[in-house]
Image (cartoon, rainbow, N blue to C red):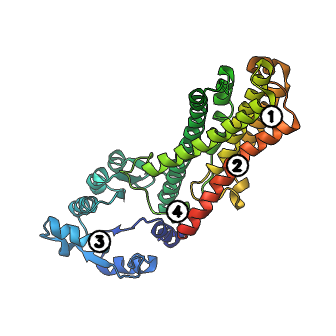
């Protein structure tokens, strides 16, 4: 038994992953190994069974479903038994990953949702039947792959959350201005600039978000659940509307201050352009988590996000103070009062979103 296996199994239990040992060893040997690894105890403290191959003889489909429900160990099993165990677990609604190294393991490896062959002592038949091969034959490597898979899914959701809410904000800003009867709050080149700068850089940084400390303490995702759930879609919608609302408010202030003549409107558009850009940059920090506050110890764990933020800020400053870019984007230099409006418009959504998260934390303290 390798060092660290017991700790790895504990991680699996915390992650909602049930570990079942299927072995050709004698029942007493298998039961003792299970005891040492704490495999024979369910998370709620209930004792789990060790099942001998003789107890599997003659079982019908209902019997197989019953026996796999509370068994931690199967001893002295045959290749047919392995296949039936995998099948019964799947029919109970489980997503099954099966490890193996021998020729006799091939049918069960192929039947499992994820067949995992050993790279060192595994046969070529087992490797061909499996979906993946671990090169070090270490159970901890499999758990590490599960963690990385969860991180990838989380980062995809962050990427979607940020891009969809920011693009919705741009669409709503333009559409609402037209419906109200206002002038266009953004120019064509400014929209293109936002899509190239404040959309791409922070979104890519969110895709590189490191693993959360509690990523392996969460229950598994339902494989049948879509990424875009109704709750997630509503989150994107109301946050996109919030970003757009602050941008339109800044545009209204700009028109009030500078009028809607050619020069005044250009000034108001610049304020709206900068406000939307800065709201998106700040929003990236809120998009790191749907539940947790951005203002935690993990605020500085993603260096890529801070680099993207710095790049966006520098480029946005260049957009209003670097003459060649000012000419292309049709912007004007902003005053300190203008920057106050931009800053307020950028941070109001952040404050509102973080306040909502705080309210959800009080409602759902176990999450």
Sooner in the amino-acid sequence: mark 1 or mark 2: 1
Residue bearing the label numbered 3: 74
Sooner in the amino-acid sequence: mark 4 or mark 2: 4
Asked whether 76 or 205 is in front, the reply is: 205
Front position among marks 1 and 2? 2
Please say if 98 is above or below 346.
below
Sooner in the amino-acid sequence: mark 3 or mark 4: 3
x and y, in percent, of residue 354 in the image: 65, 56
Asked whether 260 or 198 is in front, the reply is: 260
At x 39%, y 67%, the residue is 18
Instruction: Give residue 216's mark.
Output: 4
Residue bearing the label numbered 2: 348
Quarter-of-image position of residue 328: top right
Instruction: Give residue 314's mark.
Output: 1
Q: In the drawing, does residue 130 fall left or right of residue 199?
A: left
Sooner in the amino-acid sequence: mark 3 or mark 2: 3
x and y, in percent, of residue 288 in the image: 62, 51
């Amino acid at each position: 038994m390798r060092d660290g296996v017991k700790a790895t199994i504990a991680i699996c239990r915390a992650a909602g992953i049930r570990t079942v040992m299927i072995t050709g060893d004698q029942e007493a040997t298998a039961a003792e190994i299970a005891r040492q690894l704490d495999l024979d105890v369910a998370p709620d403290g209930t004792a789990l069974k060790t099942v001998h191959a003789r107890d599997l003889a003659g079982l019908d489909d209902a019997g197989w479903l019953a026996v796999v429900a509370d068994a931690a160990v199967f001893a002295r099993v045959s290749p047919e038994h392995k296949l039936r165990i995998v099948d019964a677990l799947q029919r109970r609604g489980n997503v099954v990953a099966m490890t193996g190294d021998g020729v006799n393991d091939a049918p069960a490896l192929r039947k499992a949702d994820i067949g995992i062959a050993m790279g060192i002592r595994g046969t070529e038949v087992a490797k061909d039947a499996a979906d993946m091969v671990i090169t070090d034959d270490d159970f901890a490597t499999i758990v590490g792959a599960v963690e990385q898979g969860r991180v990838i899914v989380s980062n995809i959701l962050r990427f979607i959350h940020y891009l969809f809410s920011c693009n919705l904000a741009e669409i709503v800003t333009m559409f609402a201005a037209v419906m109200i009867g206002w002038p266009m709050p953004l120019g064509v080149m400014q929209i293109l600039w936002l899509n190239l700068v404040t959309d791409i850089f922070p979104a890519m940084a969110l895709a590189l978000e490191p693993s959360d400390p509690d990523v392996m303490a969460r229950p598994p995702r339902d494989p049948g659940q879509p990424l875009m759930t109704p709750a997630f879609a509503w989150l994107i919608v109301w946050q996109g509307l919030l970003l757009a609302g602050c941008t339109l408010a800044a545009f209204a202030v700009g028109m009030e201050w500078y009028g809607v003549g050619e020069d005044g409107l250009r000034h108001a558009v610049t304020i709206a352009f900068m406000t939307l850009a800065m709201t998106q940059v700040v929003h990236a920090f809120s998009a790191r988590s749907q539940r947790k506050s951005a203002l935690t110890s993990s605020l500085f764990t993603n260096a890529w996000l801070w680099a993207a933020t710095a790049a966006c800020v520098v480029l946005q400053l260049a957009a209003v103070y670097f003459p060649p870019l000012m000419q292309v984007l049709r912007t004007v230099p902003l005053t300190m009062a203008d920057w106050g409006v931009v800053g307020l418009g950028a941070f109001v959504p952040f404050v509102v979103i973080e306040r909502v998260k705080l309210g959800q934390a009080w409602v759902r303290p176990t999450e």
